[in-house]
Image (cartoon, grey):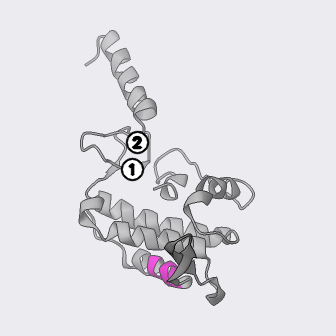
Amino acid sequence: MDLINTVAVPGSAVTNDLLSAERGAAAWWRVETARVPGGGLPDIHALRRLRSALRDVIEALVADRPVPQGAVSDLNFFTHAAPASTRLRLAGTGLLAETHWHGEYGGNPRLAFIATQAAAFLSDPSKVSKLRRCANPACSMIFIAVNPRRSWCAPGVCGNRIRVARHHRRADGQP
């Protein structure tokens, strides 16, 4: 969700947190570093292409529309761009399984990892059923609703804005 929420959907205020490798993308990767494999930063155009494919798939799922085949093909491209294999490593008195990403095939392990994680998530109906669009009409964020009653991307931000607006309407005598 972090990657797709770096751009607003059409009709929302125009924002794009991945404008360039220098502005936005490098900062985004610094935040994500602990969750993705090491290696060089991917090309900004490849990152945007992955984001677009993920956004297209998730938008379709949230809106209960058919998933675009082109977006699925793009996701599959990224999952295969840097294959992974499991390797065992001695760790103290036991063994530790590690994932080794094969960037030597020309793909970027970071993008392959994100696409692989997304494929696992998107192929699980119990997880997909928790995807929600923020109830704030001015917000384009999509989130995973762990609590089925959750309707805002961030209760302290969008939820608070909706409650404040409702309070002002009531104070002005509007429904």
Q: Is residue 104 magenta?
A: no
What count of labels does the image hold? 2
Q: Quadrant of the C terminus?
A: top left
Residue 41 seen in the current view: yes
Left/right of residue 65 with respect to residue 96 in the rendered view: left
Relative to 163, does residue 121 appear above or below in the rendering? below
Q: Residue flagged by tag 2: what amino acid is it? A: Cys
What range is drawn magenta here?
Answer: 75-80
User: x and y percent of residue 85 in the render?
Assistant: 50, 84
Residue farthest along the bottom direction in this orientation: 105
First in sequence, mark 2 or 1: give its number: 1
Q: CA distance from mark 2 to mark 1?
A: 6 Å
User: x and y percent of residue 41 in the render?
Assistant: 69, 68
Comparing 94 with 63, the one in front is 94
Give the residue drawn at x 42%, y 38%.
154
Give the residue drawn at x 49%, y 58%.
4
Task: Give the quarter of the image for residue 156.
Answer: top left
User: x and y percent of residue 39 in the render?
Assistant: 68, 72
Q: Is residue 78 magenta?
A: yes
Relative to 126, does residue 99 appear above or below in the rendering? below
Label 1, on which residue? 143
Q: Label 2: few (<14), some or many (≥20) within 10 Å? A: many
Label 2, on which residue? 153
Give the residue drawn at x 45%, y 74%.
116
Residue farthest along the front direction in this orientation: 93
Marks 1 and 2: in contact by CB < 8 Å?
yes
Left/right of residue 83 with respect to residue 122 in the rendered view: right
